[in-house]
Amino acid sequence: MKTDFWNRFSRNQLAVAGCAIVVLLFVVSLLAPWISPFDPTEIDLKNILQPPSSRHWFGTDQLGRDVMSRMIWGAQISLKVGFVSTGIAILIGTILGSLAGYYGRWVDALIMRFVDIMLCFPTFFLILAVIAFLEPSIWNIMIIIGATGWMGITRLVRADFISLKERDFVQAARVIGASDARIIFIHVLPNCMASVLVAATLGVAGAILTESALSFLGIGVQPPTPSWGNILTAGKDNIDIAWWLSLYPGLAILITVLGYNMLGEGIRDSLDPRLRS
Amino acid sequence: MLRYLAKRVLFMIPLFFGITVICFSVMHLAPGSPTDLQTEMNPRVTAEMKERLRAMYDLDKPLHVQYGKWLGRLLVLDLGVSFSPDARPVSAKILERLPITVFLNVLSMVLIFLIAIPIGVLSAVRQGSTFDRVMSVFVFVGFAIPTFWLALLLMILFGIDLDWLPISGLRSLNYEYLPPAEALWDLLKHLILPVTIAAFGGLAGLSRYMRSNMLEVIRQDYITTARAKGLPERTVIYKHALRNAMLPVITLLGLSVPGLIGGSVIFETIFSIPGMGQLFYMAVMARDYPVVMGILVIGAVLTLLGNLLADLSYAVADPRIRIS
C-alpha cells in the first residue's frame, strides 16, 4: 500500500513539481536570516522606489527597503499562517466530525446544523467582522482563519466515520469491550487521515490566499513585519510608478498556492487513483 | 411543490436563529464589554455614542435579555445608528449601497455562466484534446491566483500603461453632462475591470464542475441509446447531455452567493466602488460596530435566501427532488 503510494506519487509530474515548490519554500523560510541580502525592515530614504537593479533584484519600496529581502521573510510568515491556521481547522474539524459521525442521532444533528449555520456566513465577512472586534495581529489572524475554515473537514471526517463504523474491525473492537474513545482514536480516526491530509494541503493554500488578502487590505499582518500581502498594499499605493511592488509578491503567492494545490491533488490521486477527476 | 416550499422555509428558521446567535457572540468576543475597551481605541466615539450603544444592546442586563432585545429590533430592521459623523441609521446606509453590490454580482454571475459552461462542455466533449489541456491549466492557475493581485495587474496594464479603462469608481466626474448614450458607455467602461475580477474567481470552479458533470452524463446509458438510434452528435450533446449536466449547476448558483458577497469587499475596495463591500471595509477600519454587525447579519441572510432560491429552482427543474 505504501510503496504503491510512492510509486504513483513519484510518477505524477504535477505532484512532484508541487512537492518541490513546497520544499523550496520551507528551505527559503528557514534560511531567511542568512540568505536575505538586506535587513527587511532597514529603511533607506535615499533609495526609495528604485526599480529592479543588480543591487536590489526586485527593487525597493516606498521606504527604500529591499523588496526581495521582504519577500524572503514574508515566505516565513505565510508558511506560519498557513500551517497554524490549517492545524486549528483540522483540530476542530476532526473532533466535531468524529463526534457527529460516531455518535449519530442528536449529536450529529446538532453538529451538522452548526456546520450549516457557519456555511451561511460569507467567510471573508465573518473574518473581517471578528477582526473589527479584536486587534489585527498575526496570532489573531491565524486563529480566525482556522476557526472559520473547519466546516469542510468536519463533513469529510463525518462521512468517513459513518462508512467505517459499521465495518467488521470496528464491530470486533466493540465486542472485545473497547471504549468509545479507543474506537474513535485508535481504530477509526487513523483511517480518515488520508482524506484529512488532502484537505489540509489544499487548506494551507486557501489560508495563505486569505492571509494575503487580509494583509493587502491592511487588516492582516501589520507593517513593519513583512508579508506578501502588505507589500502589495504598497504596490497599490504606488501603482502608477512602481510596477515591481505589485508584480513580484503576487507571483510568489501564485506559485506557493499553485504548489500546495498540485501537491494536494497529487496526494489524492496517488492515495486512490479512482478519485482522479 | 407547495409542500416542498413550506418545508424548505421552515428549515430556514432555525438557521436564521443560529446566524443571529453567532453574530451576537462575535460582538461579545471583544475583551471586556464591547462599549468600553474597544471604543476607547476609536477617537471618534464620544461618550454620548457609548451611551447610545450601551442602551441599544442593554449591556447592563443579563446576556439572554440582551440577545432577545437585539433580536426583536433586528426583526423590524432596526440595526441602530452608525458611529460615523453622519450618525445615520445603519439600515439606510446599507440599503442605499446594496443595489450596487447585487447588480455587480448578478452581472459577474451572468458572465461566469456565459463563459464557464461552454468551456466545461467543450473540454468534456473533446476530453484530452489541446483545448481541454489548455483549459485545465487555466483552471488550475485560476484557483491559485489571488484576485486582488490580478486586479492590480489589470489596473496597471489597462488603466495606466494603455490608458483604456478607468480604474476607480463607477462614473466619470463629468457623468451628469454626458448625453445618455455616452453616459451608458462611461458606466460600461467603469464596469469592465471590476466585473471581470469579480467573475474570475468563480470561472475556474464552474468550468471544472461543468466538465466533470458532462463527462459523467456522457457515460450514461441514455446517451448511448440516443447515439444508437442514430441521432446526430450535436443533438446528443447539446440536447440530451447538456440539459442533464446543467441541472446540478443550478445549486451552484446559490452556493456561490457567500463567495461572491465576500469577494465584493476586495474588489469594491480596490476599485473604489460605493457598494456594501466597501461600506463594510470602511466600517471595520473605523470600528463602526453597528454597521459591521448589520452587514454581517445581512450578508448571512442573503446567503440563506440564495440557498433557498437554488433549492427551489432545482425542484422546479427536476421533479425527482420534489417527490423525495
Image (cartoon, grey):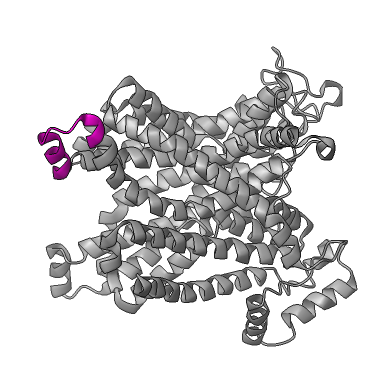
The residue at the point 45 percent across, 64 percent down is: B308
Q: Is residue B260 left or right of residue A215?
A: left
The residue at the point 74 percent across, 28 percent down is: A239
Where are the magenta residues, as a range?
Answer: B220-236
How far across and down, in percent of the image, does residue A114 sit?
45, 69
- Where A22 sits versus A215, above or below? above
Q: Is residue B41 left or right of residue B271?
A: right
State which quadrant residue B187 falls in: top right
Q: Is residue A143 left or right of residue A55?
A: left
Q: Is residue A177 visible?
A: yes
Does the magenta portion include B228?
yes
| Image quarter hosting the C terminus of chain A | top left
| Image quarter hosting the N terminus of chain A | top left
> Residue furthest toward the top?
A54
Front residue of this view, candidates B274 and B39: B274
- Where A183 sits versus B126, above or below? below
State which quadrant residue A233 falls in: top right
How far across and down, in percent of the image, does residue B145 sit?
53, 34
Q: Is residue A136 visible?
A: no
State which quadrant residue A265 falls in: top left
How many marks overall? 0
Front residue of this view, candidates B195 and A276: B195
The residue at the point 46 percent across, 37 percent down is: B114
How far across and down, in percent of the image, does residue B139 sit?
43, 33
Main SS, magenta region, reads helix
Does the magenta portion include A228?
no
How far across and down, in percent of the image, does residue B35 sit?
78, 73
- Where B165 sits versus A97, above or below? above
